[in-house]
Amino acid sequence: MVALDPRIHPFRPEIAAKYLQGQVEAARFVEGVRHEVVEPIAAVRRTPSHEARLDSQALLGERVVVYETTDEGWAWGQLESDGYVGWLSANALGDTGRAATHKVAVPRTLGFPGPDIKLTPAVALPMGAGVAIVRQDERFAVTANGWHLPAAHLAPIKARRRDFVAVAEEFLHAPYLWGGKTSLGIDCSGLVQVALQAAGIACPRDSDMQELALGKLSSLGELRRGDLVFWKGHVAIARDGETLLHANAHAMAVAIEPAADAIARIKAAGSDVISVKRI
């Protein structure tokens, strides 16, 4: 059997997705049940524990195919948006409802219980969260559960940003968080994924997957805006021929720095650039 990546193929020795039968070994194979993320941000963890490593995050409105739910309240499944597999709190999932009509198009927005910004917000939503809008109320777009979201902070679900680098720049100074995908905390590959998805470009979750899947090979000598620079376990976005934007543990934030400085610093830590990809 060909070795499959468990990050994007739902299989474990105990259980696996029915569609993988014949490709992997497992004690049983099951059909998944489709659910929807009902919390603004849902942690996707390596194991079913709140102390387990954060591998990624799922956002409101995302669909998840669940293959197992434990008595302890954990759901093991696969995100439909990028195929990532992991454990989520079952409380973060609900039945699939009306498909999202709009998505949050700014790093973070607030939803109010009525058409008044002086009301206490009912929810805070990250960029990329999907919502089903049922009506307009003055300057607000209103969801079925009554959240009033600033219409200027939303975009139609199929809208595409023209410059994904400009999207990434909106996260400047956001804190670094391994596995994060929002302005509250984001990692290097999460920044690339969120920005590319806003531009309508499909993007896998982790940097090694991104290096394999995205763009065409280029070089540091021809670096230009939008190129992706890869190291082992890290990725940065070129803002131009001389500067990079990346979420990194050195700054513990999304930061801009001269490309030459970043390359030298990371090399001194033991890692050379392994490729440059042009989107």
Image: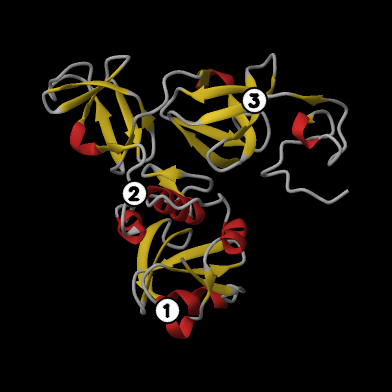
Graded by Cα atoms within 10 Å as few (under 14), some (14 to 19) or many (20 or more), the crowding at tag 3 reads many
Q: Earlier in the sequence, mark 1 or mark 2?
A: 2
Q: How far apart are the two marked residues, 3 and 1, measured between alpha carbons?
A: 42 Å
Mark 1: which amino acid? Leu
- The residue sitting at 45% across, 56% down in the picture is 192
Residue 84 appears in the rendering: yes
Give the residue type at disc 2. Arg
Q: Which residue is mark 2?
A: 160
Residue 185: quarter of image: top left
Residue in the image at 21% along x and 20% along y: 120
Q: Is residue 159 left or right of residue 138?
A: right
Q: Earlier in the sequence, mark 3 or mark 1?
A: 3
Tell me if residue 17 can be seen.
Answer: no
Q: Quadrant of residue 115?
A: top left
Residue type at numbered disc 3: Val
Q: Which residue is mark 1?
A: 223
Residue 197, given in percent of the width and then of the height, sits at: 43, 48
Q: State the CA–CA distance, disc 3 to disc 2.
A: 29 Å
In this rendering, the answer to whether 252 lies above or below 258 is above
Residue 66 tag number: 3
Helix or strand or loop: what does disc 1 sit on?
A: loop
Q: Position of residue 70 (x, y in %)?
A: 70, 18
In the rendered structure, the answer to whether residue 224 lies left or right of residue 13 reads: left
**Contact, CB < 8 Å: mark 3 with mark 1?**
no
User: Could you classify mark 2 by the number of other residues whose Cα lies within 10 Å: few (under 14), some (14-19), or many (20 or more)?
Assistant: some
- From this view, report whether residue 173 is shown above or below residue 222: above
